[in-house]
Image (cartoon, coloured by chain):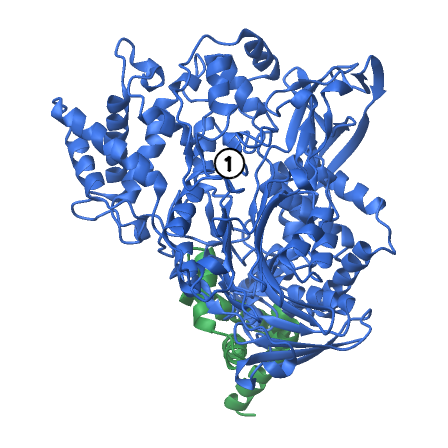
Amino acid sequence: MARNLPLALLSLAAGLGATWVGARGVGALPPLGALLSPSVGLWANTANDLPERADAKIPGLTDSVDIRYDARSVPHIFAKNELDAVRALGYVVARDRLFQLELQSRAGEGTLTELVGDVALPADQETRRLGMPRAAEARMKTMDTTGALYRILAAYAEGINAYRTSLATAQLPMEYKLLQKTPREWLPIHSSHLLNRMGYTLAHSPIELDLLQARALVGDSAARALWDSSSPVQEPIQPAPRNAPREALTALYSPGAPDTSAQRLVASLGSAPGALRFIRDAALTADERFALQQERAFASNNWAVSPSRSISGKAMVAGDPHLELTLPSIWFEVHLVVPGAMDVGGVTIPGLPGVTIGYTRAFAWSFTNTGGDVMDFWRETVNDAARPTTYELDGAQTPLEARVEQYRNAKGNVIATDTVYYTHRGPMRKQGSEWLSMRWTVLEAGNELLGFYQGLHATTASAFLDSLAAYYAAPAQNMIVADTAGTIAIRSTGKHPIRANKGRGTDILDGRTRGNDWIGFRTVSQYPQSFNPAQGYLASANQEPVDPQLDSLYLGTDAHYEIWRALQINRLLRADSTMTPDQMRAFHTDPGSVRADRLVPAFVAAAQARLQQGDASASLKAAESILSAWDRRYTRDNTGARLFETAMVRAMTLLWDEFIPAGKDAAVVRPSESRLLQLVGDAGNAWWDDKRTGDVREDRDQLLARALAQAYDTLVTEFGDPAKTPWTWGTVAPAKPRHLLRLDGFSAPDVPVDGGRGTLNPSTGSRRANFGASWRMVAELDASPRIRAVYPGGQSGNPGSPRYLDRLATWGNGQLDSVRTPRTPKDLAASDVRATLTLTR
Amino acid sequence: MTKRSIFLSAVVLQVAAQAFGGVWGAAIAGLLVGLALRDRGAFRIGFGSALLACALLLAFVGARGGDVLTFASMLGGNFKLPGYAIILVTLLLPAVQAGGIAGGTARLLRAQS
């Protein structure tokens, strides 16, 4: 008895303790028993992936739907009417991407905290303060519930919810098990939230606050030359009548005396990090923001060639949107067939019921981001600086709308509250002692899906673009299309605001008068566009859409665009008039870089000049040796690109020291990199002088050589002596698709890639950002389109599935898969069918 | 009943309990083993049967197409642990639950009788 009792209690304590830890978790330790149970935990998600045959029910379905998953796990949906096809689309997307659906819609709704906890509060606050959920709610309130758009959104929701409610606990996606949550009901408004989120990702680049701070530091003329002017090299989307880019490398104004009015406004806005809250990543310093922008390659390419420039005599189109590389991918590949009504394939964004980029029997299309200026700011005069209820407008006090935003944690408890005010323009926020309101086209969008559905019935490239133009508002996209008749076309489609008095969107305006409001939008005929150009090809890569010499109406400034990839793709297309689909494929990962070709020689020449002048720096000598030996191509095995990239970052930091306010140690703003083109030919420009070095006045060579030597030393510390361990690009700058929740174990291994910043494949991983080609497609528009495509990752969002990463190697090697385009279920060979799914009522 | 048949019965009980009851199943089955076996050896039988049952269920996952070893490495990557550690924890947790509860219960009952 005496011996048994303590041992009994000890034994029970171990057993019950293990049960408690297993069922509830302790501290940061999750409930391991529930997670590791082979029958209901994470292990269960690894079994029975995509069974060969399955049946399911969707209550709203009007007829049965036959779905065949091909060998690439692409579901081919054969439905008898379009709404059933949409219901089936919702079902198959949910089947592979249920958690992603919820995460992405919550990101646009500002309710991430309810799913992932307090860590998401800053992101949710930004979303709500930008007015995104309010806009989605307003959109849904005014939507005709008997109209086509609502019926599409509702049908999609029916499909998602049919799958969601069919799941047993053991079948829930892993992420829900880890977060100890269950999937919420999908509502039509969730698609609207997701659309806003895409707008935030692609059309949120205000420059007013940057320009203002720059004016406060270097004066109006110098700041405007950097921020409020066009790109220094013009290779526009709408082809200009010439066969080469137009270079406008005018000398930059030297930094001047501060603009006192700008200084006053900056002072009243507050200059502490985070004060200028409309800027993305406002809490970071300008240097950190710049580094992140360099890594965050929100970009894309698309191009098309006419039959006259293709070896087959058929039009071809290619595209590769550059977005964050996540697992699962932002894209899900599908094919929908409704005999006599619709036959469309390509990629859909989970949560949006449509094919975003893809093909029909008659044409294929792809998008790049237009990136123009679609967000403006006004300085409002309110009746109460702390708790305003009205704002001044045309001499009258006008009521403000106040909306209280409550943020809840995963348990449903309120963790924070905000009051967001709205003027007739949009959301208004306090910045220092000022109140700034904002107008943004993304908040005024919402009918885009209708454009897609109408466009899918088009039979020509022009009709497709016209359908989209009728409904598409934001985020503005450069839509390229080629059809089987040989037409190629591109149009920068979306709302492009027109400001009063032929104004620009670069300054914060006085909000007291409607006279400073937007006065309209460009008409479709005013959109930058081109149909069957004489040059025989079209290309967009986020560059300025139209040469301002040909169309002076304001669209944006150099800060909104990027020139490097546009120069590269045009260089490649001009050089070859006998294109093949495989050459188009190879362009996606072409390692050539106009940026490196233009700027590396400047570094090398500077280093050589300094060495000849007696600079004895061993680092400079070693760096010059590496850089001059580099062929300036971003192949995965090159050993010079890492040094160039680091030297560029360093040079930008040294160069723009004028933007470091007195008493601070970091710049508050940074001009775009393309401005270097204007400076490298101007060796003595005052911008080269580093004012922190006192009496010494640096010139171009001194500054570039210093940046190069410092970059070399940095890399030696980070990666070791290059003589012993060369800085091989594929090793030091791999792509790293990461899991949506940033879980290392569910993220992809490092993928060495050809490409880097400024090349057509800006895929590089970093500590904070992993961007790159999220989808690559080449379409040859023969009588029946021949499509080749790939994206990084796999169709399944389940890390335990063999379909989670099965496309990664193909993507990493720059190869493409052949896309199946069956007209009927019988067109898919039995050997090519991985699984079937039959949906009934 | 021989010790072997007792052990096999406990394994069957654990397989059913863990398959349908997950983490609670292992505990309840452990309790039943403890109640049934007031004799010495309840801990060992509870522990061993739960461990073997869990291993069988894991093997069943593999038989249904799950790549257990690869997935163990992925899971381990989230906790900075090697894959085998995840498998070990998977097996040991129900074993400690069931063994502890079975052994403790049996000893308590012995102490009272």
Q: Which quadrant of the structure image shows residue A21?
A: bottom right
**Mark 1 nearby-residue class (10 Å; few <14, some 14–19, many ≥20):** many
In the image, residue A573 lies at what x, y percent? 41, 51
Q: Which residue is mark 1?
A: A561
Q: Position of residue A682 (x, y in %)?
A: 31, 21
Q: Could one spot residue A624 in this view of the protein? A: yes
| Image position of A292 with respect to A24: above or below | above
Residue at 12% in and 25% down: A612
**Chain of the residue where label 1 is placed in the rendered structure:** A
Residue in front for this viewpoint, B68 or A274: A274
Letter of the chain in blue: A
| Residue at image point 63% right, 46% down | A198
Q: Is residue B85 visible?
A: no
Q: Residue placed at 32% from the left, 36% from the top?
A: A598
Looking at the image, which residue is at 69% across and 51% down? Answer: A466
Position of residue A408 relative to residue A668, above or below, is below
Is A322 positioned to the left or the right of A654 in the image? right
Q: Is residue A644 above or below residue B11?
A: above
Specify the amino acid type for callout 1.
Tyr
Q: Is residue A234 left or right of residue A99?
A: left
The residue nearer to you, when weighing A252 against A770, is A252
Nearest the camera: A840 or A62? A62
The C terminus of chain A, quarter of image: bottom right
Residue at the far bottom: name it. B1
Of the chain colours in the picture, the one used for chain B is: green
Q: How many marks?
A: 1
Name the image quarter holding residue A332: bottom right
Residue A660 lies, in percent from the top left, at 43, 18
Quadrant where the N terminus of chain A lies?
bottom right
Under tag 1, what secondary structure? loop
Locate residue A257, reporting x and y percent.
Answer: 45, 7
